[in-house]
Image (cartoon, helix red, strand yellow):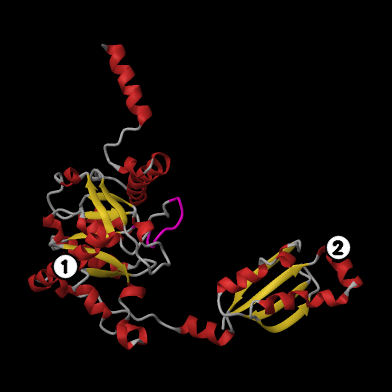
Amino acid sequence: MPAYVLLSKLGTDGMRQILAEPDKLRGVRRILEEYEANILEDYHLLGMYDHCTVFEVSDNFRAQKAILHEELTSAPDTTLLAAIDFPLFERMVKQEIRTDGPHRWQIKWWAKLTRLAFRWYHYSKHMWRYAKPFTVTGMENFKTVKGPCITVANHSSHLDAIALYHCLPQRLKWNIYFGAAADRWFLKNGGGRKELALQPWYNSLIGGNFPIRRGGGSATLDYSKWLLQQGASLAIFPEGTRSTSRKLSRFKHGVSILALDCNVPVVPVYLTGLSQLRPKGSREVSAGPVTANIQPAIYFPEGTTIPEATRIIYDALNDVHQRVLTHGPQAARWDHVSAEGAKGTQTTDEQQG
């Protein structure tokens, strides 16, 4: 079971109560045991904290719920720390995460045909079932994109990739590849789990995914550049992981490096509704409205630096994100004009008339 360390400050009043009623020292133990905790050690401390309890409990939820008990929250200060025993920590440090891929055969005609058929059936089935309705705005913004491009989107759900794929024009669906975390979707031999042994092969062929190693690295960029050079397009979530906050996470520089080195445009797409269908951490999927809002393609002038390009891409999606927070999902359209802006324009026109 997971182990935890609970540090408590008793304060002056708390120490006086302990001196008057020594049995109160066992109060923390009693509360934790109510939540099925196994007490490993109890210490009185000389220093910043006055009391330390080391215990085991089945999960984070029970541990957190225990320390929210009224008697513990009345203490001036309590700190709960998750603990990892040293042998396990040593194994974690020494363990090398082995991944499989990328697989260059995924751009062969037979792989594309297999993937297109699977996506048409499997992806469409999910969209028909859960995205009610599925709306795409700004499709006209792809008209300026003549060759390969990099499509980027905000990331809040496992269903994002399916929705992003379905908003693309048909010519891109035939030859687009999605970045996926190498340590999650491309573990060699399934990371020791037999049922996942074929996962890297499946994700390359059926999912059209290529591995992105967290922390970057030349291997990830080299393969991505190779795909673009072969005329393929890429779909990447530059936040790097699914976000649960009201603010977009800081973007990684990978997309900027690829766009500048390969001289390809970036097409931002803002997705709405998916975090309600399947929130992060949930396995249940519910039905609801989903919208993919395609924004104008970004072309970088010569001399643009990598940080500048990252900021431009981030602003393109974050500006939409802020509009949605203020005015609602309908404000995600690329041509959205707020009520205040429309009123101001009308007043100006009247004055000119």
Based on the picture, tell me whether residue 240 belongs to the magenta stretch. yes
Nearest to viewer (mark 1 / mark 2): 1
Left or right, residue 328 beside residue 22: left
Residue span colored magenta: 238-247
Tell which of 104 and 111 is nearer to you: 111
Q: Which mark is residue 121?
A: 1
Residue 70, image x, y percentages: 72, 64
Left or right, residue 299 beside residue 109: right
**Can residue 111 be seen?**
yes
Tell which of 136 and 35 is nearer to you: 35
Q: In the figure, 101 relative to 335: above or below?
A: below
Give neighbour class at mark 2: few <14, some 14-19, many 20+ (Cα, 10 Å).
few
Q: Amino acid at mark 1?
A: Tyr
Q: In the figure, 266 relative to 80: above or below?
A: above
Q: Which mark is residue 13?
A: 2
How many marks the image carries: the answer is: 2
- Identify the residue at the far right of this view: 20
In terms of secondary structure, where does tag 2 sit?
A: helix
Residue 295, image x, y percentages: 26, 45
Question: Marks 1/2: CA distance?
Answer: 67 Å
Residue 276, image x, y percentages: 38, 57
Residue at image point 28% right, 85% down:
197
In terms of secondary structure, where does tag 1 sit?
A: helix
| Majority secondary structure of magenta residues | loop
Residue at image point 9% right, 69% down:
113
Which quadrant is home to the C terminus? top left
Q: Amino acid at mark 2?
A: Asp
